[in-house]
């Protein structure tokens, strides 16, 4: 009997090692990629953003998290849409990965002023097709409502070259986008929504979207800052440290990962 037990243990251990990991694909724009890469770990998405932190919060023997984020990606058709193969291959790579779960977070680039007509008329259908592509590979799909935008008309005309198209529209992003995402999810029985926006708004420095001073937001990278800022426009030094207005800093991304672990693993409210 003792011999059988001694022999059985290595076999059981080997069997456990063959249990496949749950694969989680994080697909989205720069808020998934981890821009502005201010963590000190470099600008490789593999060591950036909420996917990096989520992997470290989960059991690495049971879960594998991959970052398929690509900056400037849109849902609506265009030169930088998720299915524009010449611009990026992240959507194709994510499908080829055959994830068990996929986290989708898009919308920031779809609410730029020049794309608002497409956002109003094409966004829902385009997002539904994106969802369907992952349902076809038997992935469980989660739509993430992204963190709030803390300023208006950003990532557009405020930096060189002058005369660029209007930037991201705050009201559309903070109010219309979450409503559209919920409407899209309601059309798919196997799609779930995780609301990160509300969690940010519950944090003490992030409650007011009219005040660009959320401590989980990043500092604008130098090349994204206006050439000149009048003193009355800069605000306090504390707020300037968080003036990007849409991209989280590394601490913000870490907190996003904590929210997602609650929802994905513990089945709890993310906040």
Image (cartoon, rainbow, N blue to C red):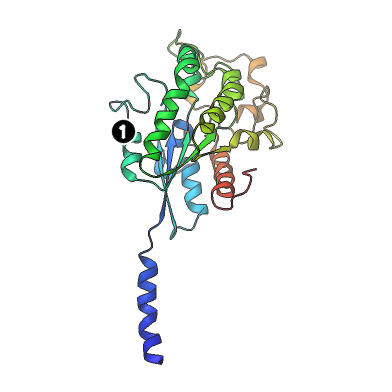
The foreground one among 34 and 257 is 257
Task: Please tell me whether residue 240 is drawn above or below residue 34 in the rendered image.
Answer: above
| Pointer 1 local density, CA inside 10 Å: few below 14, some 14–19, many at least 20 | some
**Res 147 quadrant in image:** top right
> Which structural element holds mark 1?
loop
Task: Please tell me whether residue 41 is drawn above or below residue 234 in the rendered image.
Answer: below
Q: Is 248 left, or right, of 140 in this rendering?
A: right
Residue at image location 37% in from the left, 87% down from the top: 4
The foreground one among 168 and 236 is 168
Residue at image location 50% in from the left, 19% down from the top: 111
Task: Please tell me whether residue 117 is drawn above or below residue 209 in the rendered image.
Answer: above
Residue furthest top as drawn: 163
Q: Residue 34 location, x and y as percent? A: 47, 36
The quadrant in which the N terminus is found is: bottom left
Q: Is 137 left, or right, of 150 in this rendering?
A: left
Task: Please tell me whether residue 16 is drawn above or below residue 82 in the rendered image.
Answer: below
Residue furthest right as drawn: 204
Q: Residue 56 location, x and y as percent? A: 49, 53
One can see residue 146 in this view: yes
Q: State the count of labels.
A: 1
One can see residue 245 in this view: no
Q: Residue 28 location, x and y as percent? A: 44, 33
The foreground one among 167 and 244 is 167
Residue at image location 49% in from the left, 41% down from the top: 190
Residue at image location 65% in from the left, 43% down from the top: 271
Which residue position holds label 1? 89
Q: Is 65 left, or right, of 263 in this rendering?
A: left
Q: Residue 194 location, x and y as percent? A: 57, 39
């Amino acid at each position: 009997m003792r011999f059988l037990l001694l022999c059985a243990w290595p076999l059981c251990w080997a069997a456990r090692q063959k249990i496949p990991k749950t694969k989680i694909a994080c697909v989205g724009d720069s808020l998934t990629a981890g821009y502005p890469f201010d963590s000190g770990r470099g600008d490789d998405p593999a060591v950036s953003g909420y996917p990096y932190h989520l992997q470290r919060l989960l059991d690495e023997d049971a879960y594998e998290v991959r970052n398929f984020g690509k900056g400037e990606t849109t849902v609506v058709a265009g030169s930088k849409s998720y299915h524009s193969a010449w611009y990026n291959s992240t959507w194709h790579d994510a499908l080829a990965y055959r994830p068990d779960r996929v986290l989708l977070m898009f919308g920031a680039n779809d609410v730029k002023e020049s794309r608002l007509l497409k956002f109003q008329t094409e966004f829902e259908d385009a997002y539904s097709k994106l969802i369907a592509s992952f349902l076809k590979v038997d992935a469980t799909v989660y739509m993430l409502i992204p963190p709030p935008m803390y300023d208006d008309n950003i990532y557009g005309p405020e930096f060189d070259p002058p005369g660029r198209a209007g930037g991201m529209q705050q009201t559309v992003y903070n109010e219309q986008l979450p409503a559209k995402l919920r409407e899209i999810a309601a059309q798919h029985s196997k799609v779930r929504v995780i609301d990160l926006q509300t969690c940010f708004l519950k944090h003490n420095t992030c409650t007011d979207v009219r005040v660009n001073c959320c401590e989980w937001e990043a500092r604008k990278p130098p090349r994204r800052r206006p050439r000149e800022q009048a003193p009355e426009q800069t605000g306090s030094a504390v707020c300037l440290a968080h003036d990007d207005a849409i991209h989280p800093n590394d601490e913000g991304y870490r907190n996003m990962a904590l929210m997602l672990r609650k929802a994905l693993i513990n089945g709890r409210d993310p906040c």
